[in-house]
Image (cartoon, coloured by chain):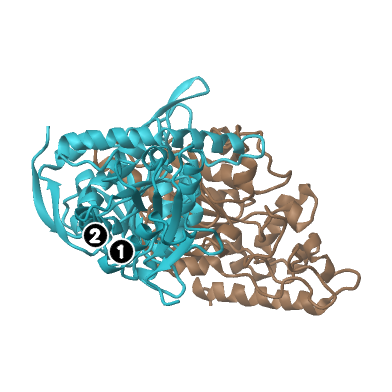
Chain colours: A brown, B cyan
């Protein structure tokens, strides 16, 4: 078994806070951006955070954390290009294996952690990711999903939710934002069968850090899908980041689950498990949508009930699908 | 002292694979493409039989192959890959990143025409498309040289004064699939001693501490590779690469000399390989396997008293313009042969750069002409070379007007 139930580590928030930070202040991420929270939680959760190499795809995180001659990374870090973080990580992992075989590197192999945004993961980097997973490299790939190409100015991605307005899917008179549903990246990755897959949400930090631990303890590749709230692109006040983050899971838009590559089981976890057992606790999707400017056209100047209803129905359908996968139905 | 060697019947691809076996890189990541495939097939055998400790990463594309090279080399490993044609084009984006990060990656290229139309045979268009990517580029003439140059490549690229990636070119099929007796070192230790058992990873000063220029987690200060550099620093990054590139010609010559001591073989001064150039009135400038055909024909012309010489450019990047100036000054006719597409330009890249080098001479050659030949594997047999040489003689004698560029061996 691979997963949170196997992790014998339940830190308190204070214990986590006291662990050293490896992502240092001075970076230029926007106020309210969830990505630094995701990075800090990931690095704090690793069993041996001193023996880590970080690989970063091109994106907000990379650009805003390494403006030469400065860097926020207190771990060895490499950025290659947009679409090849997983391939780059493959090379890093293979290198330490070879150096160990030759006796140049002694001791445990470093943990290779990849941070990729949704553009670099769902879209342009999907091939590189799939290749690395299939080859079974031992790496932890953390997707911070802010649901659009935020670094270039909020353009549509296959991760963008339906009817969200982006700069390439504006809310027009004829087309009300992005017409398509979000690509189910977690299931696509799980379909490789050899990967530990988990969705996480920085608001539900206890579930988050346990899943990183589970990923580190698994001998094969791991893929962590973190929802990453973006005040700039989602158009809301910075102080709402954690509220919106929480609602993403409570509405079941970003349910918390994991895929166990050894048993091939899908397991629903944490808050989502509670909702699975208490369906009345599921929050209507409107509560999430109405806080964000990217969905404003669903409410103003006139309320478009049929579009809100369509989103709700699709969320319900996806949630039902997950419940079936996890054996609840 | 020349080390003991054995003769093996090897084609160019196998020769590269054998060189890799003797060097034993830490990581090889590659994707198959004709005519490079035999390199990775043969090397996979060595891996499967446990004859090398190399991590062989069988990636899903050339883009990932070169991307894995970046990760591996940044981790401090000795890294090598190989490709051709469209595969090299798919690597294009990352080639610039490799050189910018100063990673001494070795890349074998079995030169092949690029699509379209799709073709698998030799020309140099694939390599020429990468000529501004900040890589050292060497063109070999036969399988022996492919073996020798692959070994030399690691030593050149990894030199702490250089730290630049290196591309070793071998003509697709003409070298890659053509077998000859290749002398290889009997004891791989000779090669290991030549290039070093492991890659020498340079040390740098960072925030007052001495650190290894790698992703080593045990560095006292961790290194950030591939940061974001604006208009305030980007130019300096590039300027330093250019400065490193300037040191390459001397290092190539030195490695060529050092290799001679262990092998008994050397290739001119490492940069250019002249054949009867000193007293020649007419000099043909060429790269790759065609040089052999040209020497074969030129020998006959020499017997007839025609003073013709062949100058093979072995190192295309950095371009050995000083060598060309020295060797070509005062010649009657210089004919430059490009095996490359030359869309919308005065001439092929070898021609244009030769022309630029010669421009600064007071006694520059009277006539400099360009021939484009052999695209998509079109044969360049001795009869065609003779036709071209006859034309050059007529130009020299003033019986035919010189021209800028001609295509040989094509239906007009």
Residue position marked by numbered label 1 in the rendering: B385
Extreme residue toward the top, this view: B208
Residue B33 placed where, x, y %? 34, 66
Please give left or right for residue A181 compared with residue A81 in the image.
right
Please give left or right for residue A56 compared with residue B174 in the image.
right
Q: Chain of mark 2?
A: B
- On residue B297, the disc is 2
Question: From mark 2 to mark 1, how far is it between C-alphas?
Answer: 7 Å
Who is closer to the viewer here, B81 or A257?
Answer: B81
Task: Tell me what residue is drawn at x 42 percent, y 77 percent.
Answer: B411
Residue A183 placed where, x, y %? 59, 70
Please give left or right for residue B212 compared with residue A243 in the image.
left
Who is closer to the viewer here, B236 or A320?
Answer: B236
User: In terms of secondary structure, where does tag 1 sit?
Assistant: helix
Instruction: Tell which circle, 2 or 1, labels the residue nearer the N-terminal end.
Output: 2
User: In terms of secondary structure, where does tag 2 sit?
Assistant: helix
Please identify the quarter of the rendering in which residue B291 is found.
bottom left
Marks 2/1 in contact by CB < 8 Å: the verdict is yes
Task: Tell me what residue is drawn at x 31 percent, y 70 percent.
Answer: B379
């Amino acid at each position: 078994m691979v997963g949170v139930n196997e992790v014998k580590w339940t830190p308190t928030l204070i214990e986590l806070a006291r662990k050293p930070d490896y992502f240092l202040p001075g970076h230029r991420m926007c106020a309210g951006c969830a990505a630094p929270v995701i990075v800090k939680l990931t690095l704090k959760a690793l069993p041996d955070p001193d023996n880590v190499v970080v690989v970063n795809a091109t994106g907000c995180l990379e650009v805003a954390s390494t403006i030469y001659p400065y860097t926020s990374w207190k771990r060895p870090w490499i950025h290659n290009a947009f679409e090849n973080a997983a391939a780059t990580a493959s090379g890093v992992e293979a290198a330490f294996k070879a150096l160990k075989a030759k006796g140049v590197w002694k001791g445990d192999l470093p943990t290779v952690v990849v941070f990729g945004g949704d553009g670099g993961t769902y879209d342009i980097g999907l091939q590189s990711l799939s290749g690395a997973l299939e080859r079974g490299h031992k790496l932890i790939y953390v997707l911070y999903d802010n649901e659009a190409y935020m670094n270039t100015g909020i353009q549509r991605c296959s991760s963008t939710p339906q009817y969200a307005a982006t700069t390439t899917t504006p809310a027009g008179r004829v087309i009300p934002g992005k017409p398509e549903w979000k690509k189910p990246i977690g299931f696509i990755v799980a379909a490789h069968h050899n990967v530990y897959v988990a969705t996480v949400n920085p608001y539900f930090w206890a579930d988050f850090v346990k899943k990183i631990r589970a990923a580190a303890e698994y001998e094969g590749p791991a893929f962590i899908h973190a929802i990453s709230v973006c005040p700039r692109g989602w158009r809301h006040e910075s102080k709402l980041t954690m509220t919106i983050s929480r609602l993403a899971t409570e509405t079941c838009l970003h349910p918390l689950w994991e895929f166990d590559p050894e048993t091939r089981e899908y397991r629903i976890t944490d808050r989502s498990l509670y909702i699975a057992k208490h369906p009345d606790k599921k929050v209507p999707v409107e509560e999430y949508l109405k806080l964000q400017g990217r969905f404003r056209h669903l409410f103003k100047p006139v309320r478009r009930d049929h579009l809100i209803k369509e989103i709700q129905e699709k969320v319900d359908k996806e949630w039902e699908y997950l419940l079936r996968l996890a054996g609840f139905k | 002292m020349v080390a003991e060697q054995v003769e093996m019947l090897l084609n160019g691809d196998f020769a590269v694979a054998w060189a890799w076996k003797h060097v034993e890189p830490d990581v090889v990541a590659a994707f198959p493409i004709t005519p490079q495939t035999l390199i990775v097939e043969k090397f996979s055998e060595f891996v499967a039989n446990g004859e090398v400790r190399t991590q062989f990463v069988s990636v899903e594309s050339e883009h990932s192959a070169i991307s894995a090279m970046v990760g591996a080399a940044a981790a401090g490993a000795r890294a090598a890959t190989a490709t051709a044609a469209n595969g090299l084009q798919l690597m294009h984006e990352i080639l610039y990143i490799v050189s910018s990060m100063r990673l001494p990656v070795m890349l074998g290229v079995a030169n092949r025409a690029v699509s379209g139309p799709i073709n698998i045979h030799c020309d140099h268009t694939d390599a020429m498309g990468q000529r501004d990517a900040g890589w050292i580029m060497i063109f070999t003439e036969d399988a022996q040289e492919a073996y020798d140059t692959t070994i030399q490549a690691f030593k050149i690229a990894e030199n702490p004064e250089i730290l630049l990636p290196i591309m070793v070119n071998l003509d697709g099929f003409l070298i890659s699939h053509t077998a000859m007796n290749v002398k290889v070192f009997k004891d791989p230790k000779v090669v290991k001693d030549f290039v070093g058992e492991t890659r020498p990873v340079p040390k740098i000063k960072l925030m007052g501490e001495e650190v290894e220029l790698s992703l080593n987690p045990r560095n006292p200060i961790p290194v950030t590779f591939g940061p974001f550099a604006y208009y305030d620093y980007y130019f300096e990054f590039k300027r330093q690469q250019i400065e490193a590139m300037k040191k390459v010609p001397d290092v190539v010559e030195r490695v060529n000399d050092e290799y001679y001591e262990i092998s008994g073989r050397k290739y001119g001064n490492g940069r250019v390989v002249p054949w009867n150039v000193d007293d020649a009135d007419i000099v043909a400038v060429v790269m790759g396997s065609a040089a052999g055909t040209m020497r074969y024909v030129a020998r006959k012309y020499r017997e007839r008293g025609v003073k013709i010489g062949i100058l093979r450019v072995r190192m295309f990047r950095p371009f050995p313009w000083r060598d060309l100036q020295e060797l070509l000054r005062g010649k009657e006719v210089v004919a430059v042969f490009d095996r490359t597409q030359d869309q919308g330009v005065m001439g092929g890249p070898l021609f244009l750069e030769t022309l630029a080098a010669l421009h600064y001479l007071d006694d520059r050659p009277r006539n400099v002409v360009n021939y484009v030949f052999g695209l998509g594997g079109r044969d360049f047999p001795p009869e065609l070379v003779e036709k071209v040489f006859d034309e050059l003689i007529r130009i020299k004698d003033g019986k035919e007007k010189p021209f800028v560029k001609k295509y040989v061996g094509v239906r007009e």
